[in-house]
Image: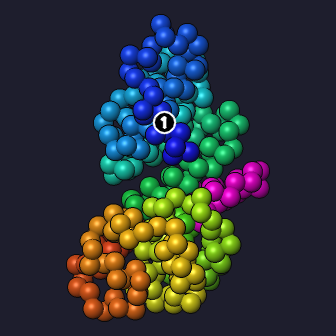
């Protein structure tokens, strides 16, 4: 999937995305959304949002609801990264309503999970649990191993926030069975961070979390530079390898480490 976006970024030019060049308006809108996604992944949030906004307007004017919902979804993603949580949820809900009407179950699953993540970042955990459960209910209709890993990651966060050791243990077992080399590198590293945070903040043992199984897999898939890019501070690299050393770290470093996976002041100030 990432390769598809990178390819789009190199192949598509603004002047090529016009009715004069692409007469099929559905195809034109799909290319606009794809291009916006590629720009977003490349880190240019402002330009990506403009592309999505254009696709949203064009789709609405032409009555192409699939393209309309996809653009809303993309804008919701950008707003969540910018931590504009209320606006992000509004766009996600509008996209969810449209995809539900179109019967796009897999899209509804992902957006429900995204809303749960935004509510976690917002510090509104009961709403986060509600949308995570809605996403979970949709698994009965589809078989998506990739989506399941992402949803379990979200539920793992909630099990730490809610101090639910039973759910935490069950999710770790499921994640261990699901883990493959198709899991995104950043998510894999964030999983390691999350499990270390669970050990530090909740006392969930590395044995319970299968931590060293995940660490062994991760170190075969990613190199030190990948980990350093995600954690941000070189001095925290040793904490990934040896979680029991956390007593040697200052509160500010632990706070930074925690903020890699938890963004709400509610959780960060709680600990």
Q: In this picture, is 111 found above or below 32? A: below
Q: Nearer the viewer, residue 216 or 166?
A: 216
Q: Residue lying farthest top?
A: 20
The percent position of residue 131, horizontal first and vertical second, equals 57, 56
The percent position of residue 15, horizontal first and vertical second, equals 38, 16
140 left or right of 108 in image: right
27 left or right of 10 in image: right
Q: Quadrant of the C terminus?
A: bottom left
Q: Nearer the viewer, residue 105 or 19?
A: 19
Residue shown at 60%/77% (left/top)?
172
User: Which secondary structure, mark 1?
Assistant: helix
**Viewer can see residue 235:** yes
The percent position of residue 135, horizontal first and vertical second, equals 63, 55
Q: Is residue 187 magenta?
A: no
Residue shown at 32%/40% (left/top)?
44
Q: Which span is picked out in magenta?
A: 131-152
Q: Mark 1: few, some, or many residues within 10 Å (few <14, many ≥20)? A: few
């Amino acid at each position: 999937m990432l390769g598809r976006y990178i390819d789009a970024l190199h192949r598509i030019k603004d002047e090529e995305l016009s009715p004069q060049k692409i007469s099929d308006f559905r195809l034109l809108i799909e290319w606009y959304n794809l291009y916006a996604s590629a720009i977003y992944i490349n880190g240019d949030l402002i330009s990506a949002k403009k592309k999505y906004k254009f696709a949203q307007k064009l789709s609405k004017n032409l009555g192409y609801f699939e393209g309309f919902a996809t653009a809303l979804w993309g804008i919701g993603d950008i707003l969540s990264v910018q931590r504009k949580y209320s606006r992000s949820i509004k766009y996600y809900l509008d996209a969810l309503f449209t995809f539900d009407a179109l019967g796009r179950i897999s899209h509804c699953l992902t957006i429900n999970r995204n809303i749960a993540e935004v509510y976690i970042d917002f510090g509104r955990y009961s709403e986060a649990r509600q949308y995570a459960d809605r996403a979970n209910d949709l698994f009965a209709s589809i078989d998506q191993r990739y989506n399941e890993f992402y949803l379990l990651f979200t539920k793992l966060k909630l099990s730490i926030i809610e101090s639910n050791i039973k759910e935490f243990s069950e999710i770790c077992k499921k994640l261990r069975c699901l883990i493959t080399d198709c899991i995104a590198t950043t998510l894999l590293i964030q999983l390691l961070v999350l499990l270390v945070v669970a050990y530090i903040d909740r006392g969930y043992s590395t044995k319970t979390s299968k931590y060293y199984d995940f660490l062994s897999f991760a170190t075969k898939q990613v190199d030190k530079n990948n980990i350093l890019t995600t954690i941000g501070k070189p001095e925290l690299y040793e904490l990934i390898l040896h979680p029991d050393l956390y007593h040697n770290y200052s509160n500010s470093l632990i706070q930074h480490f925690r903020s890699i996976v938890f963004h709400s002041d509610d959780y960060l100030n709680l600990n």
